[in-house]
Each structure stands twice: as structure tokens, then as C-alpha cells.
Amino acid sequence: MSAKVFDTKEVQDLLKAAANLGNDAGSARTKQIAHRLLSDLFKAIDDLDMTPDEIWAGVHYFNKLGQDGEAALLAAGVGLEKYLDIRMDAADREANIHGGTPRTIEGPLYVAGAPVRDGVSRIDINPDADAGPLVIRGTVTGLDGKPVAGAVVECWHANSKGFYSHFDPTGAQDDFNLRGAVKTGADGQYEFRTLMPVGYGCPPQGATQQLLDALGRHGNRPAHVHFFVTSDKTRKLTTQINIEGDPLIWDDFAYATREELVPHVVEKTGGTALGLKADAYKEIRFDIALTPLVQGQDNQRVNRPRAAATTAAVAA
Ligand code: MBD
Ligand code: FE
């Protein structure tokens, strides 16, 4: 069909009616966004001559996406989450905020409520025969290089199957396995004692992988560890490190890799004395530099729905 209808009065009136423009009811911002997104969709349907079958396949896809609980996973996979980082990086440059450890995407698998410990936390709760011991440590500083005391470093990562606790389809992990939080002392240092993660892959039967298949893409990430780093005097940093040597480092389906976020992995001995499961272990040193508040505020704080869990209360 070559007939184009988008620019007709009938269609433009339909778009205004659907977004309920021209009155004060509802949210002005939601109406503005709905009108724009619907308009862009209608225009694309017209331009590309999308068929009714294609539209209904897409509508059904949204149902599956919701049933699978994968909307945030899809957002990572189609580059939407990376795009938000690109925009925040550009806003920082415009505001003359430079330096510090680069941000990269949060992803959909954070769980709030991990126990906070001073300086050091052992975060592998469940045994994992296929994962060797890993220590991740570093110093939290400001842009001036001075240690930040009282910073909270949170980390979370997958097990040797690429599964995260709370979201593990096998149900094999306890709450907060491979999730932890450490508060820095005057030296700014933090340390996590944990197990080496393996890269994540999208659920093979899920809506996200379904679209990736149709695009001829894979749905895998390199092995990585996520961080949130907060303090009273700095902006919250959301970032990740990749495990050096993973073949997918520059082929991440979520586009989170950054040059500065692939620290060296060093072979060490002396793990037994640290309480690790073997004497030989791997160590990653990841120093973190935070950016200052802007006029006393974190101007880039991201609020999004997040899972939460609580550590089981011990009977008094
Ligand atoms: C992950 O572990 C992740 O970090 C992202 C961004 C998407 C899916 C799984
Ligand atoms: Fe992840």
C-alpha cells in the first residue's frame, strides 16, 4: 500500500484525541510524551507500510515481554540503557564535570538490602564448585585523590552459571549470595571476598532473546561485577568491571564495556589465610574516584523500580 495518511487531519486529530491534548486533565508531561511516541509510531507505520499482521505481532510481543518480566532486560539489550549513559555523560561534559571512574549501566538485576560491613565483606554464601576465589579491592577517593571515609560500596554479580541470586531460575542461591556492601574507613579502602563470576545470557525462551534472534544477535554479556558507590559528599556512581580476558568484552549485548573498566586480574597465593576456599586466588584491584555533589546535590541520581529483600531476622 503506498497511500500515506499520517499527515491528514483525521489522523492528526486522532493523535491529539488519544493523548487528550488541549485540556488540563491528566499529566501534561505524560500527554506530551504519549503524543510524541504515538505520532512517531504512526509515522513509522505509514513510512514502512507496516502490515496489520506485523502490528499484531508487536502488540502480542508486549504481552509476552510483560509475562516474562523482561522489559528492563530488553531496555539493556536494545541499547536504551546505554543511551541514557551517553546522555548523562554529555550532560556532565556540558556542566564541566570531568574525571572520576566512568559510569556504566545498572542492568535489571540489583537487589536492595544487602548487609553493610566495615571495610571487608565475604559475599559468597553458597558453595559453587565451578568458581574459584576472587578478591576485589581498592580505594574510594574524590577527584582530588584523597580517600573518602564513610563511602558505601555495593557490589553484585553472577555465579559460575551466570545466574544472580534472587533471579536464579534454578532456585539454587540464598538471598544476597554474591551481593554485598562495604563501608570505607578513613583509608577509603574496600574489599570483597567472593567467587569468580561467569557471563550472563538472556533466558533462551524469553521475549528479549526472541527479538535478538530475529535481529541475528546474541544475548550474552562478558563476566562482570556491578557496583553502586555512594557517600554524603559525592554523587552516586553506578558502574561495572569486566573480567579481563573474557572473549565477549567488546561484544556485550548490553553495551556496558568501557576501556577504563577492565582492570587486570592478578594471580595470588595466601587465600587460606584470608579464609578463601583455596590458597591460590585471583585479585582485582579497582580504585574508584567519585565526583562531587553539584550545589550540594546529586544532579544525576537515577530513581527506578528495584527489587528488594531483607536478611531473615534472627529470633531475639
Ligand atoms: C545482566 O547481568 C546485566 O548486567 C544486564 C545489564 C543485563 C542482563 C543481565
Ligand atoms: Fe549483570
Image (cartoon, grey):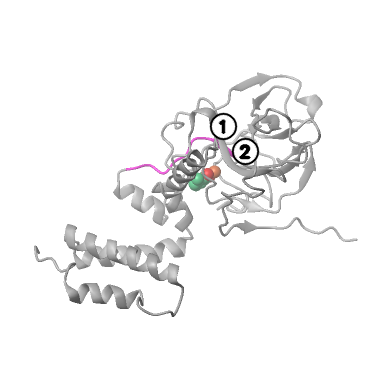
Q: Where is residue 63, by image quadrant?
A: bottom left
Find disc 2 in the rendering and name its residue. 291
Distance of mark 2 from mark 1, alpha carbons?
7 Å
Verify whether residue 225 appears in magenta.
yes
Q: In the figure, is residue 146 to the left or right of 19?
A: right
Disc number for residue 99 = 1
Q: Amino acid at mark 2?
A: Thr
Q: Position of residue 235 (x, y in %)?
A: 63, 44
Q: Where is residue 163, by image quadrant?
A: top right
Q: Going 43% across and 79% down the picture, which residue do you hit?
A: 24
Quadrant assignment for the C terminus: bottom right
Q: Where is residue 313, by image quadrant?
A: bottom right
Q: Amino acid at mark 1?
A: Gly
Toward the viewer: 221 or 280? 221
The stretch of residues the image draws in magenta is 217-226
Q: In the figure, is residue 302 to the left or right of 65?
A: right
Q: Going 27% across and 67% down the picture, which residue do you hit?
A: 56
Q: Going 54% across and 39% down the picture, which residue do you hit?
A: 103
Q: Position of residue 64 (x, y in %)?
A: 40, 63
Toward the viewer: 22 or 31? 22
Are dots 2 and 1 in contact, CB under 8 Å? yes
